[in-house]
Image (cartoon, rainbow, N blue to C red):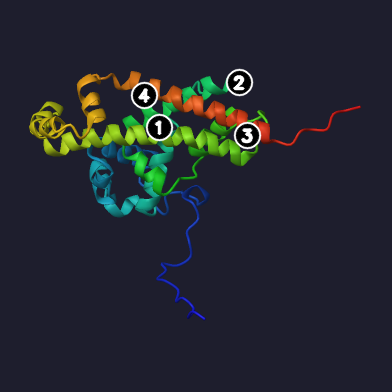
Amino acid sequence: MAAPQQPGPSSGPARPPVWSRPRTGGRGPQPSLSVEAIVAAAVALADLEGVDAVSMRRIASELGVGTMSLYRYVETKDDLLDLMTDQVMGEDAAGAVNTGDWRADLRDLAVRYRKLMLRHPWVLPIGASRPPMGPNVMRRSERMFGVLDGLGLGIEEIAGLTSTVVAFVRGVVLAETAEAELFRRTGQTRDDYRRAVGPYLKEVLAAGEHPLLARFVHEAEDEPDPDREFLARLEHVLDGVGVGLERLRGQQPQQPQGN
């Protein structure tokens, strides 16, 4: 019999989500401060310099207050990240309603989500590693599930199909933002990169061992429009959702016919 595992290190009981805890500002709150002002400053800083630049000290400096005063409103940096993420998730809520056309509605959700992630690329790794449960995130999830509600699927099947679209969007945005971050970090442009790797790639492809790759390099569009490319590939994903929808609906038990 294997020896029982020893419990790992613990920092104490898990804290409830920030939205379930009162945020009153504690004793003697500063009139110029609020949770909303702190979150807005943090979002602006993350958009400009990346989420690694966000710290309580830096936010306090941006707002012109003492660092400790922020903790009267936001207890930890993790709380701040959750609040930041939920705030931006509510940016495109106006006019976002389901029409009853599942394909059009999923397309609209995907397009909106990509635009939001491109505006705030720091949200992607945070949301993937620790999904926030704030009101805006929950409203967005409820709308997404509602796209396929009433079509004869179970809730797990609805979640599976809609999460496929979300995963596609995240993958596209990850590639787009990673390239932009590389150019920002190195100071290189896309042309600089091509000049650097061009001779090597030409030599490798000339050996003839990668004919399909060579065909892609020679025939593919040099500067494809990212929006057009995204929409074209999204249609392929929606085609797959449609196939999955029909297959899953066919597996549902038939309702007994009335007399």
Q: 10 Å neighbourhood of mark 4: few (<14), some, or many (≥20)?
A: some
Label 1 and label 2: CA atoms lie apart by 22 Å
Horizontally, is 128 left or right of 209 in the view?
right
Residue underneath mark 1: 169
State which tag comes first along the sequence, 4 or 3.
4
Residue kind at label 3, given as amino acid type:
Leu
Work out whether mark 2 precedes mark 3 in sequence or the reverse, and give the earlier one: 2
Which type of secondary structure does the marked residue at label 3 adopt?
A: helix
Q: Residue under label 4, please give it.
A: 230
Q: Position of residue 43 (x, y in %)?
A: 32, 38
Cα distance, mark 2 to mark 3?
A: 19 Å
Question: Does residue 180 appear left or right of residue 76 in this picture?
Answer: left
Q: Nearer the viewer, mark 4 or mark 2?
A: 4
- Residue at x 37%, y 27% (from the top left corner): 115
On the question of residue 242 being in view, the answer is yes
Q: Are marks 4 and 3 in contact (CB under 8 Å)?
A: no
Question: Disc 1 or 3, which lies upstream in sequence?
Answer: 1
Q: Which kind of residue does numbered mark 4 sit on?
A: Phe
Return the disc, 4 or 2, that comes first in the chain's sequence: 2
> In this rendering, does residue 223 appear at all?
no
* Residue denoted by label 3: 248
How far apart are the two marked residues, 4 and 1, measured between alpha carbons? 9 Å
CB within 8 Å, label 2 to label 3: no
Position of residue 252 relative to residue 30, above or below, is above
Foreground pick, 218 / 252: 218
Q: Amino acid at mark 2?
A: Gly
**Nearest the eye: 47 or 131:** 131
